[in-house]
Amino acid sequence: MEINEEVGKERLNFLEEIITKAVEEGKEIQTRFPPEPNGYLHIGHAKSICLNFGLAKRFCGKCNLRFDDTNPSKEDTEYVDSIKEDIKWLGFEWALERYASDYFEQLYDWAVELIKKGKAYVDDQTQEEIRQNRGTISVPGTPSPWRDRSVEENLDLFERMRAGEFEDGAKVLRAKIDMAHPNMLFRDPIMYRIMHTHHHRTGDKWCIYPMYDYAHGQSDSIEHISHSICTLEFDVHRPLYDWFIQELGIFPSHQYEFARLNLTYTVMSKRKLLKLVQDGIVMGWDDPRMPTICALRRKGYTPAAVRAFAEKVGVSKRDNFIDLGLLEFCVREDLNKVAERRMAVIDPIKVTIRNYEEGRTEMFECVNNPEDESAGKRMVPFGREIYISRNDFMENPPKKYYRLSPGSEVRLRYAYLIKCEEVIKDAEGNVVELICSYDPESGNGGSSDGRRVKGVIHWVSAADAVEAEIRLFNNLFTKEDPNNLPEGMDWMELINPESMVVTKAYMEPSLADAPVGVPYQFERVGYFCKDKDSTPEKPVFNRTVELKSSFVIK
């Protein structure tokens, strides 16, 4: 067996140690990513995707994509398609595309085998009765009145369940294990329930569907999954996973657990995310404030940044709470290398350069990305009237203020030195225009007498500017951990009313034809990308992440 050269160059996490040992023993490495197609994947799933596909790649194995489609009432091909798109966007390809429904016949046959061994029985109790009779940690459960049905009767009833003779909820098939077992999951767990529901792949062929705990381990076994990697909440399910495999005498797949991802200012419960969508708090599943992968993509995050984040978070056996700042740090690090620079002015003030010839336009050469020479340069128009950012002007500045103020001088990036000579205000006293002069000899970084200024600000030519809607996204919640609240507090009370601020900007003309989703750095402002809501008349740009942050990797 081979191991990629990178293994051994750095400290291994506990899963890598386990797999390294398996490789040394000559075992084939086979992982899988098994989402249920009942919703959109989020950043927590992204970590699992990177882990399962990454381990397979690192140890020269394979990773399957298997959809756990055992609950047809909540599943749809829409989610199947979105999940496949997300995985490909992250940069991974699966070895085999499989579905739990591919194995329905085999799972049924194995259930019959367990009935014949006296290890499963048909129960007529309702779900509520089963729940009430399960007992507690300290009190054993009460056996079902139908627990001792004969093998022949159970086989007949189970076959009739499959044939559709019974209504939903009338009967279930349960494993016959131990109603006093300290692990509550061993107290005769349900294997099959009746659901007369159309399945997105099998149609109406089946009206009984296997439960997760019954289907998952056997599906792993069928695919010869060597390392079934789940999040930590499934550790209590592992003994039951092993029990089914041992009783059936099939390929011994084994489950390993790692800590799930918890992110500050974020909820990742499907129930809560669905409520945000249904209540109109967000614009949909791909709203850039959501933690879904499609939302990260719409916001302008890059696959490389998400993979780097997953790598930095690492793998542990304890639940951890990750600062959202780490994800944004990874995004900022990647975009600094790949995003081309553009000039855009948010909250603009008009500047008129009184000694610049009216009607004159000249072009200045601007660098697309100082981190990447191959990105080249572009030409940006300049004229008598320009826009600058309002926060680049102060009428009564403090000491060591190096931007524009009355009587002071700054350099326009790539262009001239200008000096503020007059401030024009409206009736309410708001600054609406600045009258400036410029030094004609100061192009290309020079000046008429060799003087230098410390302030450099960005600008946009008013005559050529493209007006755009700008969406500034902030944390969706006001509390760092919206999942851990005092008793009586509703998590919906923590919605940040300023989570999306809509404003306008004037941008250099090259951004008019920017492709949707391609990231740009608006110089001195932040990283942005064009949104799918854009029209030729009204481009819309999302802020991906601010240019700087106080977050520091410890």
Image (cartoon, rainbow, N blue to C red):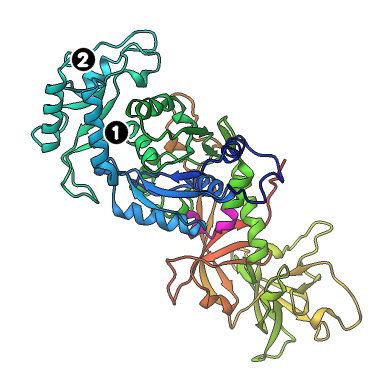
SS at badge 1: loop
Disc 2/disc 1 C-alpha distance (Å): 19 Å
Instruction: Please rate how many residues cluster around mark 2, counting C-alpha atoms within 10 Å: few if below 14, some from 14 to 19, many from 20.
Output: some
| Residue 108 image point, x, y percent | 23, 36
Residue at 40% x, 35% y: name it.
251
Q: Closer to the N terminus: mark 2 or mark 1?
A: 2
In this view of the protein, which residue sits in the foreground, 205 or 531? Answer: 205
Q: What residue type is labelled 2?
A: Ser
Can residue 28 be seen?
yes
SS at badge 2: loop
Residue at 81% x, 70% y: name it.
408
Can residue 431 be seen?
no
Question: Horizontal placement of 57 versus 253: left or right?
Answer: right
> Which residue occupies the extreme top position in the image?
139
Instruction: Please rate how many residues cluster around mark 1, counting C-alpha atoms within 10 Å: few if below 14, some from 14 to 19, many from 20.
Output: some
In this view of the protein, which residue sits in the foreground, 185 or 340? Answer: 185
| Residue on which disc 2 sits | 144
In this view of the protein, which residue sits in the foreground, 491 or 452? Answer: 491
Residue 400 lies within the magenta run: no
Q: Which mark is residue 277?
A: none
| Residue 226 image point, x, y percent | 47, 39
| Residue on which disc 1 sits | 211
| Residue 164, quarter of picture | top left
In this view of the protein, which residue sits in the foreground, 323 or 223? Answer: 223
Question: Horizontal placement of 435 versus 106: left or right?
Answer: right
| Residue 335 image point, x, y percent | 63, 61
- Please identify the quadrant where the C terminus is shown: top right
| Residue 162, quarter of picture | top left
Q: Which amino acid does label 1 sit on?
A: Met
Question: What are the residue bounds of the magenta stretch?
Answer: 294-306
Question: Horizontal placement of 529 versus 245: left or right?
Answer: right
Question: Horizontal placement of 171 versus 36: left or right?
Answer: left
